Structures are given as structure tokens and as C-alpha cells.
Image: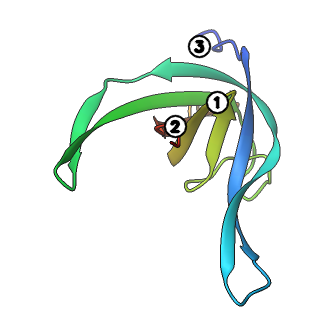
Amino acid sequence: MAAPVPLTHAVVLEELQTIPDGLGGQTESWTALGTLWAALEPGTGGETADAAVARARVPWRVVVRGAPVGAPSRPRPGQRFRLGVRRFRILAVAERDRRGARLTCFTEQEEPSA
């Protein structure tokens, strides 16, 4: 069995919340769910076209401790990790080993807001 990957980065797990704005509409806001220790493993970058504009696509694997399905500490697609000003959108989550001691979260780094 391979040695476990060291979890050296404190990342904040966030979820998008829809909040009434008091005027009949809604606003969206990212809410922190908690801090997890993680390892960040870069993937192979690429480029996609979006409305005739090329965008860099930067995939990352974020490894965290395992948690049962349905637990609030288990990341899910649609959530994201925050590490300082960096944001990593979660695309998929899978057990890294047979025991489920670690999870691999397949993410894409988001471009910073203007």
C-alpha cells in the first residue's frame, strides 16, 4: 500500500447559496462550510473557446480526508475550494483508495473575478 499523500494546505470548502434580495429577486453568495486539510496536485492544462475568446483551463486534483457520502464535510460537485485568492470548482469526487481514507476531488481553477 502506498504512503498517504501529505495534506499540507488548509482549504475552505464553499457552497453557492441563493439569498432573497428583499426586492423579489435573489442574489448568489458563496458560503464557507468548513476548512479541510488538502494536497493539491496539478493536472495538464488546456484551452477552450468561449464566445470566440480562448480561455485557459487549469485542472487540479485536490486530495482530502475521506468522509461518508452525505456528510457535510464530504465535498460534492458544484461546490468549490478556496485557498487564499485561488478558487477551485469541484467537478467530481472519487475515493482515492479502497478504504475511502482519502478522496480525490477533480477540480478546475477559476479565473479571478475582475
In this picture, is 62 found above or below 40?
A: below
The secondary structure type at the circle numbered 1 is: loop
> x, y (%) of residue 80?
61, 45
Q: Which residue is mark 1?
A: 85
Q: Residue 67 occupies which quadrant of the picture?
A: top right
Q: How much space separates mark 2 and mark 1, taking CA atoms?
A: 8 Å
Residue appearing at x 23%, y 35% in the figure: 47
Asked if the residue under mark 1 is in contact with the one under mark 2, i.e. CB atoms within 8 Å, the reply is yes
Q: Which residue is mark 3?
A: 1
Q: Say which amino acid is labelled 2.
A: Pro
Q: Say which amino acid is labelled 1.
A: Val
Residue appearing at x 56%, y 31% in the figure: 96
Residue appearing at x 74%, y 87% in the figure: 23
Q: Residue 30 occupies which quadrant of the picture?
A: bottom right
Earlier-in-chain disc, 2 versus 3: 3
> x, y (%) of residue 41?
50, 19
Q: Say which amino acid is labelled 3.
A: Met
Give the foreground label among 1 and 3. 1
Residue 93 in view here: no
The secondary structure type at the circle numbered 2 is: loop
Dot 2: few (<14), some (14–19), or many (≥20) neighbours within 10 Å? few
In this picture, is 23 found above or below 70?
A: below
